[in-house]
Image: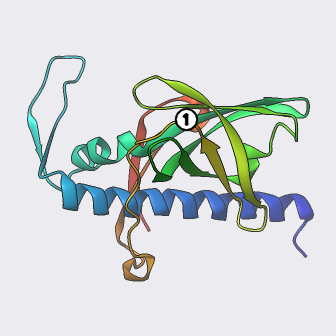
Amino acid sequence: PVKPKMRRVVAISVATGLLSGALGATAVTVATREQPTATFVNGAGDSSVRPDGTIAGIARAVLPVVASIKVVGSQGSGTGSGFMIQSDASTSYILTNNHVASGGGRDARITVAFQDNTTADATVVGLDSAYDLAVLKVQVGNLPVAILGDSDKVIVGDEAVAVGSPLGLSGTVTSGIV
C-alpha cells in the first residue's frame, strides 16, 4: 500500500506537471500565433534574433502572462507561480496551485508580482485541493492573458517548455518532453 505522505508527493508532482504542461501548451500557442521572432539581450550583450518556435522565442512570448506569487500567513509562507487567465479594464484572474494559495492559511496575505516588477495584493476566489488548482483575483486590469493550447493534441514525446517562478525566482524557463 502507498503511504499517505507518498500519495501527497505524487499528487503534488502530478498537479505541478499539469500546471507546467498548461504553461508549455500556452507557450507554444502564444509563440506560434503572436511572435514570429524573439530578440534577447544576454549579459554578454548578445542581441541576436531567435527563430520562431525556439525556447527563447517561446519564453519571450509567455513571460508577460506569468506572475510570481508570495504568500505569508499564520500557518506558513511560500512562493509559487501562476499565469493570467482573464483580464478586463480593472480586474484580472490568475491560475496557480492550491498548495501555493492556501499554504499560509485563511488569514494569509497574497502578493502577486508581475514581469514589469509591479505588485498587487490578491484574494482567493476558488480552490480545488483534489486538482491542486486555485484562482486568484487582483485589482489590476488590462494584463496579458494566456492562450491555452489543446491538451488533446499533446502526446508522449512532444517537447514541453515550463515558464514560471519556482522558489521565488522570476522568469525561469526549462524544457523537456512530455
- Residue appearing at x 54%, y 44% in the figure: 91
Q: Camera-side residue: 84 or 19?
A: 84
Residue 65, image quadrant: top left
Relative to residue 7, is residue 122 drawn left or right? left
Q: Percent x, y for residue 173? A: 40, 42
Q: Percent x, y for residue 11? A: 74, 64
How many numbered marks are there? Answer: 1
Relative to residue 86, is residue 98 drawn left or right? right
Q: Percent x, y for residue 89? A: 44, 44
**Residue highlighted by disc 1:** 68
Residue 63, image quadrant: top left
**35 up-or-down from 46: above or below:** below
- The disc labelled 1 sits on which kind of residue? Ser
- Residue appearing at x 88%, y 58% in the figure: 5
Relative to residue 106, is residue 60 drawn left or right? left
> Which quarter of the image is occupied by the N terminus?
bottom right
Furthest-top residue in view? Answer: 44
- Residue appearing at x 87%, y 71% in the figure: 2
Q: Is residue 23 among the parts visible in the rendering?
A: yes
- Residue appearing at x 9%, y 38% in the figure: 49
Q: Camera-side residue: 62 or 120?
A: 120
Q: Percent x, y for residue 138? A: 59, 39
Residue 134, image quadrant: bottom right
Badge 1 density bin: few <14, some 14–19, many ≥20, Cα 10 Å: many
Furthest-bottom residue in view? Answer: 152
